[in-house]
Image (tube, grey):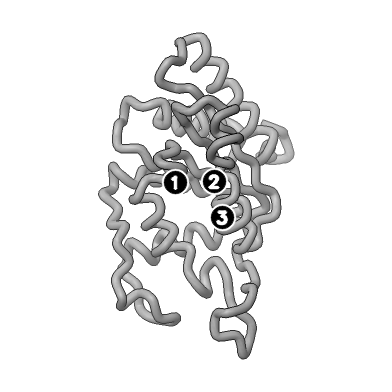
């Protein structure tokens, strides 16, 4: 089962990287094929040029690879911190350039973009891991958890992914090693719960 994993955090020593490593290990242990992108390590260019906006244009080779992978994925994992209630700019740029018309969604015939598009992503599920330094109660009562709306409704829901699961780990800055180990156990459990196991030669992994 091909799974696309996208990581967006500039510090390779961050807990986000620990989440990514744990998720990748669990996915591979469970028999999945993984396409992994560390956007900062790859120096992904988040700027959407005007030349890429029209439908049907020739895309740069690296963007083409991202588009092909996300279109072919049966599952998607996204890992990033909560910065001002948003993903890091590099990940927002990845969405702008990769989650594009005729890859992730398509407007119906006669619709110039004012209607509700049809989702094209074949992924059966999406799993988002976020980190935050805001206590959960304050996140919900003061900010309204904008990342939940962004990923569930504005992105994956619109693009046809109905099963969207999100895990938030907070407060990271004051967390202990014991707490982080417990969080990573949650990552392993979520990966297996959402994507399951793949059989090889008829034998469950």
Secondary structure found at label 3:
loop
Badge 1 density bin: few <14, some 14–19, many ≥20, Cα 10 Å: some
Secondary structure found at label 1:
loop
Which residue does the numbered mark 3 point to in the structure image? 73
97 vs 29, nearest the viewer? 97
Query: Comparing marks 3 and 2, which lies closer to the viewer?
Result: 2
Residue beneath the point at 40% across and 40% down: 83
29 left or right of 96 in image: right
Query: Comparing marks 3 and 1, which lies closer to the viewer?
Result: 1
Vertical placement of 117 versus 146: above or below? below
170 left or right of 189 in image: left
- For the question of whether residue 1 can be seen, the reply is no
177 vs 81, nearest the viewer? 81
Which residue does the numbered mark 1 point to in the structure image? 86
Q: Are marks 1 and 2 in contact (CB under 8 Å)?
A: yes
For the C terminus, the image quarter is: top right
* Residue 162 found in image quarter: bottom right
Q: How many marks?
A: 3
Badge 2 density bin: few <14, some 14–19, many ≥20, Cα 10 Å: some
Residue beneath the point at 42% across and 31% down: 16
Q: List x then y, in percent, for residue 23.
A: 52, 32
Q: List x then y, in percent, for residue 72.
A: 55, 60
Badge 3 density bin: few <14, some 14–19, many ≥20, Cα 10 Å: many
* Residue 203 found in image quarter: top right
Which residue does the numbered mark 2 point to in the structure image? 146
């Amino acid at each position: 089962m091909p799974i696309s994993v996208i990581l967006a955090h500039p510090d390779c020593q961050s807990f986000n990287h620990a989440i990514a490593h744990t998720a990748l290990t669990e996915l591979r242990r469970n028999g999945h094929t993984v396409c992994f992108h560390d956007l900062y390590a790859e120096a992904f260019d988040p700027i959407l040029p005007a030349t890429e906006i029209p439908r049907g244009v020739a895309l740069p080779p690296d963007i083409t690879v991202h588009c092909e992978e996300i279109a072919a994925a049966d599952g998607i994992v996204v890992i990033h911190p909560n910065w001002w209630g948003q993903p890091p700019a590099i990940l927002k740029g990845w969405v702008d350039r990769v989650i594009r018309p005729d890859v992730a969604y398509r407007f119906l015939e006669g619709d110039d973009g004012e209607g509700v598009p049809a989702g094209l992503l074949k992924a059966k599920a999406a799993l988002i891991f976020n980190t935050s330094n805001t206590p959960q109660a304050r996140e919900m009562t003061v900010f309204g958890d904008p990342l939940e709306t962004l990923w569930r409704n504005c992105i994956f829901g619109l693009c046809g992914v109905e099963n969207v699961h999100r895990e938030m780990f907070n407060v990271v800055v004051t967390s202990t090693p014991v707490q982080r180990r417990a969080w990573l156990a949650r990552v392993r459990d979520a990966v297996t719960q959402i994507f399951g196991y793949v059989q090889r030669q008829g034998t469950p992994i």
